[in-house]
Structure formats: structure tokens, C-alpha cells
Image: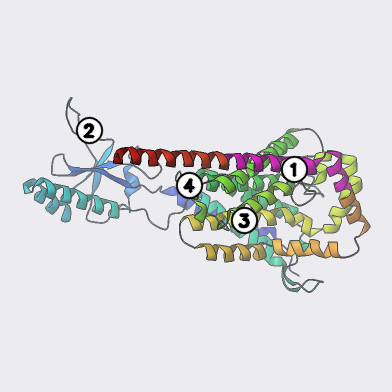
């Protein structure tokens, strides 16, 4: 079996970072089309300027290579607004010097009627917009980060590609049992966490509340997984950054992220049931409110179960118990434990990407379902699940049985099962009350409309 080489990841990351730097060299600017009119000496056309990133400052060099040979741009002279004038205030602008088609349009405007002038200005607007349309090769910083995270993920898992069958006869894709590079695992997890958090700044304002909460929940979950991965609970042989077995900044930070993840999961449950229909078609598996509520409920309960996301020793906060009861079992898991966190992060990241493609209408719900199923397989989560199923279906080694017994004892000690169920119940009751209130408001509004129509007919 091939071994994982960090040097390959370094090369890929350097190459990707070079592409990221190139994406930021020339920020793409776009000319606004809201204010376009003849002006200035020479019959130029004044065009109000607004850059793609909201910056109103004019930087002439940004347009190098963004216009064709028929247009020359230069800063426009300031125009004064006279009191009582109907002229709109013009922000920093550019002058398109009339050449070829622009000259003809301006000449037509000088002798044409008002309707003709409007047509001329509309044509100029369309032309300027087409000339200054951003190049499609430009990518955002968030997209570049996502690409780096995906590349680093496949650099980590492809050496462990092992097509065949598990011991129980189920098809196998990856065999991560030999994965033994915690630094590589930590790097991949960091890239997915960074990408997820950066994505929160890229959510369009037109997105529905449900879509926004889903992305916030996924980002919090990814950051929580990375916090456990880059700790002495995840990197059991050293190299970790956060000590979660003693009081300190790392322990406090992880608790804050954990609380935020619970809160966002509860909001996701409420919005998935009681939220409006708007925006649901931009999320995978959104055809049924019950289906989305099931996904949200699963996320909440997993946060209070031992193992899948939050290890029991995080709650117990006992170093001696961790070394005696947990460490032998985690060593038995080997590479599956080392890689498990970033495998789940990858699946969440791919789900967020698929949701973005749905929002941009590049795929439909059927295609999204197929891609989610494919991501489950190629992210390695499928093989991780099969590995733990095999362990549970056979006689458990002493170290694994000890680990499970210790986890169950911690759950009972801190009543985590009861807390999870109570929080879910509270969120569900709150959601049902919201649904009932909205139905009553809708019925009241309908009665008001019917009463108004009746009064008008009388």
C-alpha cells in the first residue's frame, strides 16, 4: 500500500496558493449602468462607476485588459449640482470617449426625440455593461480556498484507495487503517474549517433564512470537528494545539463552538419545519419538511451521543481516566481515528458545495441527491461507517469495550441523553407554537380580505 507523502501536499498547496494570489492581483471591476448620459467636452458619455466589491474609488488600472480596442476610459470631471436642478447626483465616474458606435449614438441623440434619446442611452448602457463584464476566469478567494481544501483532501486519501471488499463482504473504497500522518490530517481539517467559516461571508443577501441557518450550522459543526481533531483527544500521539483535558483557552474555545453548534442546530430544526417555502429548493433533500426535520434532529442528537462527534472524555475532563480507559481503544482504531474527523468535515464541505450549485441553478434536486450519495462514498465516510459496523457485529476487543463502557458512564453521569432530548423537545414545541400562530394570523388576514370585499360589494 502506498504511504502518504506530505511533500506532495506541500507542492499542491504551493501551486494552489499561487493561483489564489493571481486571483487577487487584478480585482474585477464593473461599470454601473444606472446613470449613463452625454456630458463633458468632446461629446463623451458619463457612466456612474461602481466596482464589484462595493468600492467607490476609481482605479484606472483596474480596467486594463477589461475593455476592447474601441473604448478609452478616463476619469470624468466633477459636475456641480445646482440647487433646484433635476439632475441626479453623479458619484465618481468614468468618461467613455466616443469612438465608432458611441459617436453615432451621441449624434443621433442630439437630434432625436425624448424616446429616441432613451433608446440611445439604453443601448449605451448595454454596450458598456457588455464591455466591462467580469472575466469568467476570475475566482473568488472562497472558491480558491475550497479548491485547496479539496485537493489536499484527495492528496491525503488517494494513497489509501483500496478497491475491494470489507470483511463482511460489503464493497470497499478506502482503507484508512494505515493512515498515520496526524500533521496531514490536521492540515486538511484546517483547510475545510477555514473554507466553511469564510463561506459565511459569501452568503447572498437574497438567501432564505433556512439556507443561511443551514450554512451557519454546517460551519459551526466543521469548526467543532476541527477543534477535536487538533487536540489531544484527536491527535493522541502528539502534535496537537488544543488541550481539552485541562482548563485553558483551548477548552473554553471548544465549549463556545460546541454551544454555538447546538444553538444553530436547534434553529435549523425550527426553520426546517416552520420556515416558508422560499429557498427550500436550494437545499439538498428539501422536498419534505419531515425529511429536513429528521436531518436536523439527527444533528442535535449526535451532539449528545458518545463518539460520533463529541468524545465523552471532553465532558469528563479527566486526564487519568482518558489515558486509562480511552487511549487503548483509540490506538486500536488507528488510522480510522486519525482520519475520521477530516473525513466528516469533507462530507459536510461537499454538501455545502452542492447546496451552492443548487442555489445557482447549475444542478437540480435529483442531481443533488446523486452527488450527495457519491460524496458519502468518495469522502470516505461510507468506509468509516462500515469499519465501525464490523466492530459492532463481532466480539469486541477489551480496549473497545472499555472505551464504550466509559463513554456510557460519562453520558449517564452528566445526564447528556436527557439534556439532548429535552432541548429537542423544547425546540419542537416552540416550532409547533410558531406554526399555530402563523396559521391564526393567516386566517385572520383572510377574514379581513373577505370582509373588505364584502363591504366594497355592498
The residue beneath circle 1 is: 420
Can you tell which quarter of the image residue 160 is in?
A: bottom right
Label pair 4/2, CB-CB below 8 angstroms: no
Is residue 345 rendered to the left or right of residue 440? right
Mark 4 or 3, nearer chain start: 4
Can you tell which quarter of the image residue 372 is in?
A: bottom right
Residue 299 on image: x %, y %: 68, 49
The residue beneath circle 3 is: 291
**Numbered tag placed on residue 78 in the rendering:** 2
Residues at marks 4 and 3, CA–CA distance in whole angstroms: 21 Å
Residue 297 on image: x %, y %: 68, 49
Mark 1 or 4, nearer chain start: 4
Label pair 3/2, CB-CB below 8 angstroms: no
Please, which residue is most extreme toward the left here?
111
Residues at marks 2 and 1, CA–CA distance in whole angstroms: 63 Å
The nearer-to-camera label among 2 and 1 is 1
Is residue 327 rendered to the left or right of residue 121? right
Label pair 4/3, CB-CB below 8 angstroms: no
Q: Point out the stretch of residues depicted in magenta.
A: 406-434
Q: Residues within 10 Å of mark 4 (few under 14, many from 20)?
A: few
The nearer-to-camera label among 4 and 3 is 3
Amino acid at each position: 500500500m502506498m504511504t502518504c507523502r506530505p511533500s506532495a501536499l506541500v507542492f499542491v498547496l504551493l501551486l494552489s496558493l499561487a493561483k489564489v494570489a493571481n486571483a487577487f492581483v487584478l480585482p474585477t471591476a464593473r461599470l454601473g449602468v444606472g446613470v449613463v448620459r452625454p456630458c463633458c467636452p468632446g461629446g463623451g458619455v458619463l457612466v456612474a462607476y461602481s466596482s464589484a466589491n462595493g468600492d467607490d474609488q476609481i482605479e484606472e488600472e483596474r480596467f486594463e485588459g477589461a475593455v476592447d480596442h474601441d473604448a478609452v476610459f478616463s476619469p470624468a470631471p466633477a459636475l456641480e449640482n445646482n440647487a433646484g436642478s433635476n439632475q441626479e447626483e453623479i458619484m465618481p465616474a468614468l468618461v467613455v470617449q466616443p469612438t465608432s458606435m458611441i459617436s453615432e449614438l451621441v449624434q443621433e441623440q442630439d437630434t432625436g426625440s425624448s424616446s429616441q434619446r432613451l433608446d440611445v442611452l439604453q443601448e449605451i448602457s448595454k454596450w458598456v455593461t457588455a464591455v466591462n463584464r467580469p472575466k469568467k476566469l476570475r475566482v473568488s478567494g472562497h472558491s480558491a480556498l475550497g479548491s485547496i481544501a479539496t485537493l489536499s483532501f484527495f492528496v491525503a486519501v488517494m494513497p489509501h484507495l483500496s478497491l475491494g471488499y470489507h470483511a463482511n463482504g460489503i464493497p470497499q473504497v478506502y482503507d484508512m487503517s494505515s493512515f498515520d500522518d496526524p500533521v496531514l490530517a490536521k492540515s486538511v481539517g484546517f483547510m475545510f474549517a477555514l473554507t466553511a467559516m469564510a463561506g459565511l461571508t459569501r452568503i447572498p443577501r437574497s438567501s432564505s433564512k433556512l439556507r443561511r441557518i443551514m450554512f451557519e450550522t454546517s460551519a459551526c459543526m466543521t469548526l467543532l470537528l476541527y477543534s477535536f481533531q487538533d487536540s489531544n483527544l484527536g491527535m493522541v500521539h502528539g502534535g496537537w494545539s488544543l488541550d481539552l483535558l485541562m482548563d485553558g483557552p483551548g477548552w473554553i474555545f471548544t465549549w463556545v463552538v460546541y454551544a454555538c453548534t447546538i444553538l444553530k442546530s436547534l434553529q435549523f430544526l425550527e426553520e426546517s419545519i416552520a420556515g416558508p417555502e422560499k429557498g427550500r429548493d436550494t437545499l439538498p433533500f428539501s422536498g419534505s419538511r419531515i425529511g429536513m426535520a429528521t436531518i436536523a434532529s439527527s444533528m442535535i442528537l449526535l451532539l449528545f451521543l458518545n463518539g460520533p462527534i463529541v468524545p465523552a472524555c471532553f465532558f469528563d475532563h479527566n486526564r487519568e481516566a482518558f489515558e486509562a480507559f480511552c487511549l487503548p481503544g483509540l490506538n486500536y482504531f488507528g488510522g480510522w481515528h486519525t482520519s475520521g474527523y477530516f473525513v466528516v468535515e469533507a462530507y459536510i464541505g461537499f454538501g455545502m458545495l452542492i447546496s451552492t450549485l443548487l442555489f445557482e441553478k447549475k444542478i437540480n434536486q435529483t442531481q443533488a441527491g446523486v452527488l450527495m450519495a457519491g460524496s458519502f462514498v468518495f469522502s470516505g465516510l461510507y468506509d468509516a461507517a462500515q469499519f465501525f459496523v464490523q466492530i459492532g457485529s463481532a466480539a469486541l476487543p477489551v480496549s473497545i469495550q472499555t472505551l464504550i463502557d466509559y463513554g456510557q458512564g460519562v453520558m449517564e453521569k452528566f445526564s447528556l441523553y436527557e439534556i439532548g432530548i429535552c432541548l429537542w423537545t423544547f425546540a419542537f414545541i416552540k416550532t409547533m407554537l410558531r406554526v399555530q400562530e402563523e396559521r391564526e394570523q393567516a386566517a385572520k388576514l383572510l377574514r379581513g380580505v373577505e370582509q373588505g370585499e364584502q363591504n366594497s360589494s355592498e
